[in-house]
Amino acid sequence: MRNILISIAFVASVGGALDAAAGPLLDRNYRSLAGKDEVNLNRAYGGKVLLVVNTASKCGFTPQYEGLEALQQELAPRGFAVLGFPSNDFKGQEPGSEAQIQEFCTLTYGVKFPMFEKVHVVGPEATPLYQDLTRLSGVAPGWNFHKYLISRDGRVLAQFPSKVKPDDPELRAAIEGALAAAAPQR
């Protein structure tokens, strides 16, 4: 809990500096999981509150898929979306193909929230989105199911480590606060 509060305080304290740097955070393309078409995150999800999560199918935190889907179902009508990015960066816990990942998520946990191509989230091969999330929050994912909360205007508001479940009161309060903020003019 202390780490979460420190992370939120850190992000809030440098918020002004993040505003200028974070503008293009979502202006990048990713392929839908096991798909061929690229999705521009800004065009598809700009103006929404986002929870960006690196996922894995063979992890102790994998049951969080269920809670993430529940968040998506409950809060999507209010302008919220979970964006999942499978990654095999931590102890090989996402070894399957994208088709296998998609099948597992759908059949085992009923995942309908947007899932994207398998990416690296840490180290020199990290995808640009995760490089920016790490730089802007000051915290790289330490394991699977690390969560970044993004405001309607594309700023990193907070980060939550893997052990923070989707129904955690602090995470829910942060999401509710972000949803209560006025939508940006487009």
Image: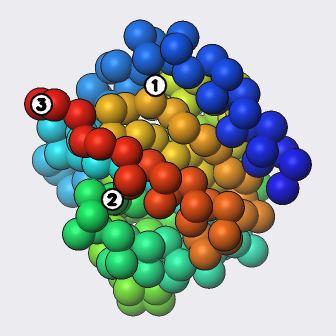
Residue located beneath label 2 in the image = 80
Q: Amino acid at mark 3?
A: Arg
Question: What residue lies at 18% left-to-right and 45% top-to-bottom?
Answer: 44
Residue located beneath label 1 in the image = 128
Which of 150/98 is in front? 150
Q: Is residue 105 left or right of residue 9?
A: left
Which of 174/108 is in front? 174
Q: Pick out the residue farthest to the right.
A: 2
| Residue 49: x %, y % from top left | 37, 49
15 relative to 100, above or below: above
Examine the image and state in which quarter residue 154 appears: top left
Q: Is residue 166 visible?
A: yes
Callout 3: 10 Å neighbours few (<14), some, many (20+)? Answer: few
Question: What residue lies at 38% left-to-right and 86% top-to-bottom?
Answer: 110
Label 3, label 1: how far apart the Cα atoms are: 24 Å
Q: Nearer the viewer, mark 2 or mark 1?
A: 2
Label 2, label 3: how far apart the Cα atoms are: 17 Å
Q: Amino acid at mark 2?
A: Phe
Residue located beneath label 3 in the image = 186
Q: Amino acid at mark 1?
A: Pro
